[in-house]
Image (spheres, rainbow, N blue to C red):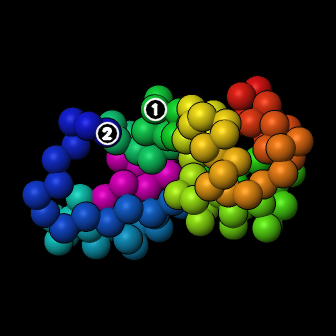
Amino acid sequence: MNSLKITQAMIVCNTKLSEHARRYVRCRGIYHIGWSSPPEHDLQTMIEEKKLYPITYLKSLKSATRKSLASAGIILLKQLTQKKFDELRKETRIPRDTLETIIQTAKS
């Protein structure tokens, strides 16, 4: 992702682009990134290579907990596992045992 330079219009979509959308972006010269296209810079590969999984990847996460994490700027599992526990607890106000469980799940 670091080698990607944005110098023109761009469409990023976290789903598959329809054939109509692909024709449109090709016709207009708009660079696009979809879940599986273009093959050399698709969103799925970028996420997997950089391990940039969103916190919503944790299906057991309750809505209130997810909101607390997002309010603290934690939107990726990598952020959750790399931040100091005490800082994370202070910023999110999530109970210690709940936070420990979430972090363990994120690491596995």
Using the rendered image of the protein, determine whether residue 108 is visible from the camera's viewpoint: yes
Residue type pointed to by label 1: Lys
* 2 and 1 marks in contact (CB < 8 Å): yes
Quadrant of the snapshot with the N terminus:
top left
Q: Name the residue under label 1.
A: 50
| Camera-nearest residue between 95 and 75 | 95
What is the chief secondary structure element of the magenta stretch?
Answer: loop
The answer to whether residue 6 is left or right of residue 70 is left
Q: Is mark 2 on a helix, strand or loop?
A: loop
Q: Residue furthest left?
A: 7
Q: Residues within 10 Å of mark 2 (few under 14, many from 20)?
A: few
| Camera-nearest residue between 30 and 69 | 69
- Which residue appears at 70% of the width and 48% of the height? 89
Using the rendered image of the protein, determine whether residue 53 is visible from the camera's viewpoint: no
Percent x, y for residue 92?
68, 57
Percent x, y for residue 82?
57, 32
Of the image marks 2 and 1, the number of the one nearer the N terminus: 2
Residue 65: name its quadrant.
Answer: bottom right
Magenta residues, start to end: 32-38
Real-space CA distance between mark 2 and mark 1, rounded to the nearest whole angstrom: 8 Å
- Which residue appears at 47% of the width and 29% of the height? 49
Magenta segment includes 33: yes
Q: In this view, does 45 lie above or below 22?
A: above
Q: Name the residue under label 2.
A: 1
- Which residue appears at 60% of the width and 43% of the height? 87
**Label placed on residue 10:** none
Quadrant of the snapshot with the C terminus:
top right
Residue type pointed to by label 2: Met
